[in-house]
Image: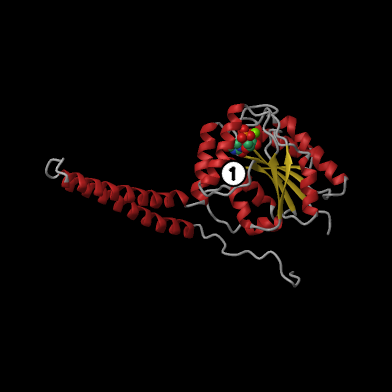
C-alpha cells in the first residue's frame, strides 16, 4: 500500500480567536505524521468556513497563502456544524485517501490522530474518536451531554457513545456515503450505517483554547431531536404502544362503569357516556399509531438510502 494522502477537515464558525492558535498545531501534526512515513507529504489541512461573520475566512485565506498545506473552502452562508463537516468531507473524498474531521477549537486531542492513522493502516476504514473523560467539561455540560446519548439510544438512534465528530473516514467509505442523499444530517448516526470495518480510539477532551462554544443546551436539544427524527421512527411507534395501553385502561374503565351502573350508584346516562369516551379514545390512539407506522415507512422510503453496499469482492476492480 502506498502512503495515504490525508485531509484534516475542520469546520470553522466565527473562530477568529482560536484559529490562529490551533491552525499551526494541525500543520505540525500533519508534518510529524508525514515524517513518520504514515501519510504522504502532499496531505492537507482543509478548513471549511461555515459562513462566519468575523475574520475567520480572511485568516484561512492568509494561512493558505502562507503554506501550501493549508487549504480552505467557504460556505455561502452558515448551515451548521454537520453540514460544514459534510461539505469538507465531500470536497475531500476525490482528492485524498483518508479524512479526519475535527473541531477547530483544540478540544479534541490531535495526538489521537496517530492511532487513527495506525488503525487505518491496519485495515480499518472508519475510526471513531471516543472521549475517555469529560473532567474538563462543566458538570452541567457533562450531565446534559450524557443525557443526550442515553436519550438517543432510548429513542432508537444508535450512536457510538461519547463520540462526537472527531473521526477518520477513508475515501472508500465516503464514496459510498455520498449515496446517502438525505438533507437532515446526523453524521454520527449515519456513518455507522455505511458499515465497513471500524474501530475506536479514546482520547481525553480538553477545554476550548479560546472563543466560545456554539453548542449551548438549546442547540444540543435541537441536534438530539434531529438525530432521533432522522434516524428512527420509534417516536411514531410509541404512539401505537401508548394506544394499546390506553385501550387496556379504557377496557377496565368500561367494566368499572358497567359495574357501578349495575350497582345503581350513578345518574342515568353516565355509564354509557363513560364507556363511549373510553372506547373511542383507545381506538383513536391505536388508529393514529397505525397511520404513524405507514408515515414512518414513507419517511424512510423518501430518504432513498442505499439498500446494500459491497465492501469486498474476490476479484480485482479497476
Ligand atoms: N461550527 C460550525 N458551524 C456552526 C457551529 C459550529 O462549523 O454553526 C464548528 C465550530 O467552529 C467548531 C465545531 O463546529 O469547530 C464545534 O463547535 P463548538 O466547539 O462551538 O461546539 P462544542 O465543542 O462546544 O460542542
Ligand atoms: Mg468545541
* Observer-nearest of 140 and 221: 140
Q: Quadrant of the N terminus?
A: bottom right
To which residue does mark 1 refer?
A: 82
Instruction: Evaluate whether residue 120 shows in this view.
Output: yes
Q: Relative to 99, is 314 above or below?
A: below
Q: Residue at x 67, y 32 (%)?
A: 134
Q: Relative to 299, is 54 above or below?
A: above
- Which residue in the rendered view is the most extreme toward the left? 268
Picture colour scheme = secondary structure
* Observer-nearest of 277 and 19: 277
Is residue 170 left or right of 276 when viewed as pictured? right
* Observer-nearest of 225 and 278: 278
Graded by Cα atoms within 10 Å as few (under 14), some (14 to 19) or many (20 or more), the crowding at tag 1 reads: some
Residue 264: x and y, percent? 14, 43
**In the structure shown, which secondary structural element does the residue marked by tag 1 occupy?**
helix
Q: Residue at x 29, y 48 (%)?
A: 252
Is residue 83 left or right of 119 when viewed as pictured? left
In which image quadrant can residue 213 be found?
top right
Instruction: Evaluate whether residue 78 shows in this view.
Output: no
Residue 73: x and y, percent? 66, 43
Q: Quadrant of ligand 1?
A: top right
Amino acid at each position: 500500500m502506498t502512503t495515504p494522502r490525508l485531509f484534516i477537515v475542520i469546520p470553522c464558525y466565527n473562530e477568529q480567536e482560536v484559529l490562529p492558535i490551533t491552525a499551526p498545531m494541525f500543520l505540525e501534526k500533519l508534518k510529524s505524521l508525514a515524517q513518520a512515513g504514515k501519510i504522504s507529504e502532499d496531505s492537507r489541512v482543509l478548513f471549511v468556513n461555515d459562513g462566519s461573520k468575523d475574520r475567520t475566512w480572511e485568516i484561512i485565506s492568509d494561512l493558505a497563502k502562507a503554506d501550501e498545506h493549508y487549504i480552505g473552502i467557504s460556505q455561502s452562508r452558515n448551515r451548521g456544524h454537520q453540514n460544514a463537516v459534510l461539505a469538507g468531507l465531500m470536497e475531500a473524498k476525490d482528492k485524498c485517501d483518508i479524512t479526519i474531521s475535527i473541531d477547530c477549537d483544540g478540544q479534541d486531542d490531535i495526538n489521537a490522530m496517530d492511532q487513527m492513522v495506525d488503525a487505518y493502516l491496519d485495515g480499518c476504514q472508519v475510526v471513531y474518536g471516543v472521549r475517555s473523560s469529560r473532567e474538563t467539561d462543566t458538570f452541567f455540560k457533562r450531565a446534559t451531554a450524557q443525557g443526550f446519548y442515553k436519550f438517543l439510544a432510548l429513542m432508537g438512534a444508535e450512536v457510538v457513545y461519547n463520540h462526537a465528530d472527531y473521526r477518520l473516514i477513508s475515501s472508500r467509505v465516503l464514496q459510498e456515503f455520498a449515496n446517502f442523499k438525505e438533507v437532515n444530517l446526523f453524521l454520527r448516526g449515519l456513518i455507522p450505517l455505511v458499515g465497513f470495518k471500524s474501530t475506536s480510539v479514546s482520547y481525553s477532551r480538553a477545554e476550548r483554547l479560546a472563543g466560545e462554544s456554539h453548542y449551548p443546551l438549546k442547540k444540543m436539544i435541537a441536534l438530539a431531536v434531529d438525530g432521533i427524527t432522522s434516524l428512527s421512527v420509534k417516536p411514531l411507534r410509541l404512539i401505537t404502544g401508548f394506544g394499546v395501553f390506553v385501550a387496556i385502561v379504557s377496557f377496565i374503565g368500561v367494566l368499572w362503569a358497567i359495574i357501578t351502573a349495575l350497582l345503581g350508584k350513578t345518574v342515568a346516562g353516565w355509564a354509557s357516556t363513560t364507556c363511549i369516551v373510553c372506547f373511542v379514545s383507545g381506538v383513536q390512539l391505536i388508529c393514529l399509531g397505525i397511520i404513524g407506522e405507514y408515515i414512518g415507512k414513507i419517511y424512510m422510503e423518501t430518504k432513498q438510502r442505499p439498500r446494500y453496499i459491497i465492501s469486498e469482492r474476490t476479484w480485482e476492480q479497476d
